Image (cartoon, rainbow, N blue to C red):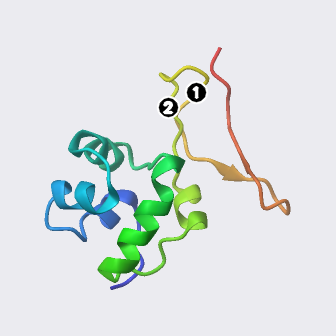
Amino acid sequence: MSEPSSISDLIANWRTIGEFAADVGCGYEAARKMRDRESIAPEHWANVIGASEAKGVTGVTYEWLAARRVFDAARPGGVAAGPVNPQAGTGHQSCIEVAE
C-alpha cells in the first residue's frame, strides 16, 4: 500500500471506522473525530503507527502524523485550529496561534 495523503485516507485503509478503532485501541467516536478533523492526538500515535504497520500501510510515522496534527481550540490550553508548521531548520513543531 502507498503512503496515505491524509488522515481520512489513512483510515480508509480499514473496512470500517470501527475496525480502525479496534486496531488502534480507541473508541468508535474518537476514531470518527480523527477522520473528521483530519488529525490524530499524540496519545494515539504509537498505536496508529503499529496498526498501520500491521495493516501494511507504509509511511505512517511520528513525523507523518505530526505534519498532519491540528490542535483543537475548544480544549483547555488548546490553540486555534490549523496544522502545525515546522520551524525552518529546527526540526521542531510550532503552534500558529494561542487561544486566550
Of the pair 33 and 24, the residue shown nearer to us: 24
Could you give the CA–CA distance between mark 1 and mark 2, rounded to whole angstroms?
Answer: 5 Å
> Split into 4 quadrants, where in the image is the N terminus?
bottom left
Q: Where is residue 80 in the image (x, y as percent from the top left)?
A: 57, 29
Residue type (three-letter) at the residue carrying disc 2: Asp
Q: Position of residue 95 (x, y in %)?
A: 68, 39
Q: Which residue is drawn at 40% across and 78% down?
A: 53
Of the pair 85 and 48, the residue shown nearer to us: 48
The circle on residue 61 is none
Q: Position of residue 71 (x, y in %)?
A: 54, 37
Give the residue furthest to the left: 15
**43 sits to left or right of 88:** left
- Is the residue under label 2 in contact with that under label 1 (CB below 8 Å)? yes
Answer few, some or many: residues within 10 Å of disc 1's Cα (few below 14, many 20 plus, some between 14 and 19): some
Label 2 sits on residue: 72
Identify the element where label 2 is drawn: loop
Give the mark nearest the N terminus, 1 or 2: 2
Residue type (three-letter) at the residue carrying disc 1: Gly
Q: Residue at x 17, y 54 (%)?
A: 18
Identify the element where label 1 is drawn: loop
Q: Which residue is drawn at 52% across and 34% down?
A: 81
Image height check: is 63 above or below 94? below
> Split into 4 quadrants, where in the image is the C terminus?
top right
Label 1 sits on residue: 78
Residue 24 position by quadrant: bottom left
Q: Where is residue 69 in the image (x, y as percent from the top left)?
A: 53, 49
Residue 20 position by quadrant: bottom left
Answer few, some or many: residues within 10 Å of disc 2's Cα (few below 14, many 20 plus, some between 14 and 19): some
**59 sits to left or right of 4:** right
Give the residue furthest to the top: 100
- Picture mark count: 2
**91 sits to left or right of 34:** right
